[in-house]
DNA sequence: CGACGCATTGACAGGGCTCAATTTAAGTGG
DNA sequence: CCACTTAAATTGAGCCCTGTCAATGCGTCG
């Protein structure tokens, strides 16, 4: 059985690009990847941030597929990749892996369905709140002031994740900071009062 | 091996509701199901229409899950459902099924990612065009005037699928009808000139 | 210290949602 | 077959949310 190919990525490295033929499926060992879809005029939609233990490019398991997203390393990131034949062999030989991957795909589909509903039915500020909470759940870590997002996240990034503009994000975060819900430095956000944010996101 | 439980659904029947405990996974034998997520105030986001040969509720394979969407029969619809234990047993005993379900989940994830990008980056009229084309590809059938969508689809439905309002859809379709791109009767749309619509959706 | 990139804030405008009034068409029952 | 009912579709007018553009501030790094 193949041991996989390891890669050490520097910040900003593109692991694979949307539209490229999908050869390999990757597991993040350390660091963080940004998965995003690009649109003309530099706009992009961030689909997901993934960290250690998470996989991406399950698409690569199937024949003649292209990567549906672009994957970029946020900080120094280590990944291990397996090619499609290897993946297929292992899954067929060891069914629980296939089932487990199905579970992951279904989970991500559910999450994206949630976000799709939000994007089509809710106003920006509430969507920003939900985005922040979602990223917090997935990549938050305790700090003295509250729960900090442990990788660089600019206003533009949060806008791309939420489906809005950096200006709206900036205005909104400023307001929340005045209320003491969050603290922020350049490219870093700490949620001080998650509960208020949840109430804000859910109450109408 | 279980033969599964068959059900014949009348138009409008809810097969399962978002949030209900997910016991069964379903395959459509004939007819059509609308998969949608509901939001307060009656708004809804249509995730997908599925027809014969397509499955839904793969979520039900995994423990302690709830249906992430509501599933409603559009016309008279026959489905067959298997419970989670049966599904799991079969997938473990016969790995190609698990792999095939993974393929379906990944494909739907990719499609939803596309739609997510569109929703966050494109203007309504272009999104309506893409929605119509997508539904056409999935449920279109040849007719004398062009390609007809073979199930009742109201302005409201198309709006819920696109993430806009029925008013905007109505205005847009009226304009396209004047240009001869489509024809429409109450709850029925025929695309007469798919090529123009594609150009419109893609050219900017 | 200068330069570059991120963030903030104000002013403005426009795309598309909201609301209301009609029109059209499909059923339904006598 | 026609009157009646009901739901879908159309269309106009107004306004608001939020995107756009521009100017400035600020923090970081070479």
Image (cartoon, coloured by chain):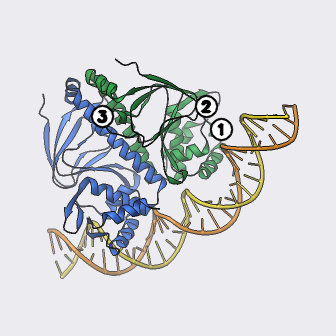
Chain colours: A blue, B green, C yellow, D orange
Q: Which residue is mark 2?
A: B146
Q: Quadrant of the N terminus of chain B?
A: top left
Most foreground residue, B38 or D12: B38
Q: Mark 2 near mark 1, Cβ–Cβ under 8 Å?
A: yes
- Taking A138 as reference, is A155 above or below it? below
- Taking B138 as reference, is A29 above or below it? below
The crowding category of the residue bearing disc 1, from other C-alpha atoms within 10 Å (few below 14, some 14 to 19, many at least 20), is many
- Mark 1, chain letter? B
Q: Which residue is mark 1?
A: B183
Q: Could one spot residue B3 in this view of the protein? A: yes
Q: Secondary structure at mark 2?
A: strand
Q: In whole angstroms, how far apart are the C-alphas of marks 2 and 3?
A: 38 Å
Q: Secondary structure at mark 3?
A: helix
- Mark 2, chain letter? B
- Residue A136 image position (x, y, % from top left): 28, 57
Identify the mark nearer the N-term, 2 or 1: 2
Q: Which residue is mark 3?
A: A102
């Amino acid at each position: 059985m193949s041991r996989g190919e390891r890669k050490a990525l520097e910040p900003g490295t593109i692991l694979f690009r949307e539209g490229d033929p999908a050869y390999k499926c990757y597991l993040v060992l350390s660091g963080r990847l940004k998965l995003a879809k690009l649109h003309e005029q530099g706009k992009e939609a961030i689909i997901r941030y993934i960290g250690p233990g998470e996989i991406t490019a399950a698409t690569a398991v199937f024949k003649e597929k292209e990567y549906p997203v672009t994957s970029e390393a946020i900080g120094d990131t280590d990944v291990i990749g397996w090619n499609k034949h290897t993946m297929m062999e292992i899954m067929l030989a060891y069914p629980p892996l296939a089932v487990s991957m199905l579970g992951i795909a279904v989970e991500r589909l559910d999450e994206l369905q949630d976000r799709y509903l939000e994007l089509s039915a809710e106003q920006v500020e509430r969507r920003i709140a939900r985005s922040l909470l979602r990223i917090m759940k997935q990549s938050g870590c305790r700090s003295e002031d509250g729960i900090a997002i442990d990788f660089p996240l600019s206003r533009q990034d949060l806008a791309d994740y939420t489906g809005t503009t950096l200006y709206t994000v900036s205005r909104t975060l400023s307001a929340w900071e005045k209320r003491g819900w969050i603290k922020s430095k350049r490219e870093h956000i700490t949620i001080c009062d998650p509960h208020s944010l949840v109430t804000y996101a859910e109450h109408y």
